[in-house]
């Protein structure tokens, strides 16, 4: 197959490119390099089955042309990360809604299979864990712009499912839970690479709030495995899937584990949310996926243990520090 990966220069996208090329597929990447980078594509850039297009998913004519040339689309391009969403909320909404609309429109016209990346953020403040795909979604007030990301992604999901219903679009929606691993940068606020970098530098490890809030971290390789299997799972068409690991850890507990595994002498400090994100920020207390449906459809679920994920990120950051020195 020839597969279009939007956002293919990003953290998840670049790992996915490597994997699909390794499986013998052709890959076309569309990325505007806003948060992605050509460095991520270093391992594949000379592969003859790889093509890079620098451009935006908001460029409708370009999207139509690229989708036409491919057999399937994996749409990862989006504005992501709480920090970026809060800094540029309207641009994030435009990208996350209009970009997806362009992709869906082109895929429906050309009868192409499309995987749409959504997010665990759509579960919002729901308190019944683990989260199942058919659960209610509970968001906060619009005045808190954090929720704009979930609103945009929910609209993407609804639009995809509408196209599936009205135009027989073959689409699969994945709600990615906290995904981490090598190449993820802490710059956009993502906690795990951030803590590792603080620990390796001996800087304070900054836990937001009490640190009692919890998350489940999945290895990017496991997310990629899930996506490639879904691409070949005709029974998954028209379905929504949680993609994540269900090993839960509090953020304070994560800081302690990273401190221990790096052998760091960093102090762990707590920072009130208001100091980090401004007044009125809301966080979710627990976020745990139910991954049964994914396993039922593809015979696989993300299982890499958190300690292994942490060690992979430590190894990458140590190697990067050595090559810089
Ligand atoms: N967080 C933290 N310190 C950081 C970055 C994040 O304590 O330097 C917290 C953040 O407030 C949230 C959790 O870690 O409770 C996960 O944050 P992230 O932005 O990685 O993902 P989210 O789950 O919020 O999308």
Image (cartoon, rainbow, N blue to C red):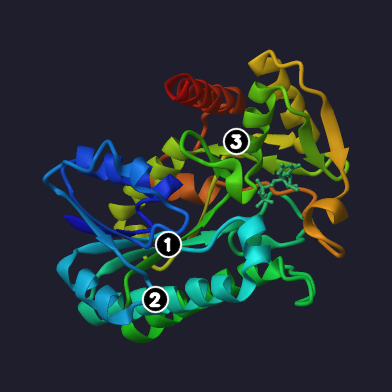
- Which corner quadrant holds the N terminus? bottom left
Sequence-earlier tag: 3 or 2: 2
The residues tagged by marks 1 and 3 sit, at their Cα atoms, a distance apart of 21 Å
Q: Residues within 10 Å of mark 2 (few under 14, many from 20)?
A: some
For the residue pair 128 and 181, the one nearer the viewer reads as 181
| Residue highlighted by disc 1 | 77
User: Residue 141: x, y in percent?
Assistant: 79, 75
Tell me the element at label 1: loop
User: Residue 185: x, y in percent?
Assistant: 54, 42
Which residue does the image show at 45% across and 82% down from the upper left? Answer: 162
Judged left or right of residue 96, residue 128 is right
Q: Which mark is residue 58?
A: 2
User: From the viewer's perspective, is residue 254 above or below residue 142?
Assistant: above
For the residue pair 303 and 263, the one nearer the viewer reads as 263
The residues tagged by marks 3 and 2 sit, at their Cα atoms, a distance apart of 29 Å
User: Which residue ends up furthest to the left in the rendered image?
Assistant: 48
For the residue pair 73 and 61, the one nearer the viewer reads as 61
User: Which residue ends up furthest to the bottom in the rendered image?
Assistant: 166
Q: Which mark is residue 193?
A: 3
């Amino acid at each position: 197959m020839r597969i279009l990966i939007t956002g293919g220069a990003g953290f998840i996208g670049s790992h996915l490119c490597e994997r699909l090329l390794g499986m013998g597929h052709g890959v076309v990447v569309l990325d505007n390099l806003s948060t992605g980078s050509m460095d991520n594509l270093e391992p594949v850039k000379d592969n003859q089955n790889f093509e890079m297009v620098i451009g935006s998913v908001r460029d409708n004519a370009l999207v139509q042309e690229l989708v036409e040339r491919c057999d399937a689309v994996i749409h990862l391009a989006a504005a992501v990360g709480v920090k970026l969403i809060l800094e540029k909320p309207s641009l994030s909404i435009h990208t996350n809604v209009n970009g997806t609309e362009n992709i869906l429109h082109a895929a429906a016209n050309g009868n192409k299979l499309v995987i749409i990346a959504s997010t665990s953020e759509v579960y919002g403040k729901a308190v019944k864990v683990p989260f199942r795909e058919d659960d209610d979604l509970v968001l906060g007030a619009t005045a808190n712009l954090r929720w704009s990301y979930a609103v945009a992604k929910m609209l993407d999901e609804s639009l995809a499912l509408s196209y599936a219903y009205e135009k027989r679009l073959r689409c699969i929606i994945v709600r990615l839970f906290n995904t981490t691993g090598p190449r993820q940068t802490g710059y956009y606020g993502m906690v795990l690479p951030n803590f590792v970098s603080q620990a390796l530098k001996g800087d304070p490890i900054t836990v937001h709030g009490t640190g009692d809030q919890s998350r489940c971290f999945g290895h990017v390789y496991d997310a990629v495995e899930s996506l490639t299997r879904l691409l070949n799972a005709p029974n998954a068409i028209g379905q929504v899937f949680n993609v994540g690991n269900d090993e839960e850890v509090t953020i304070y507990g994560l800081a302690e584990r990273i401190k221990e595994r790096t052998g760091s002498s960093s102090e762990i400090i707590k920072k009130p949310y208001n100091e980090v994100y401004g007044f009125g920020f809301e966080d979710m207390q627990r976020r745990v996926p139910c991954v049964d449906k994914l396993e039922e459809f593809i015979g696989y679920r993300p299982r890499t243990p958190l300690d292994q994920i942490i060690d992979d990120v430590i190894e990458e950051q140590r190697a990067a520090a050595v090559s810089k020195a």
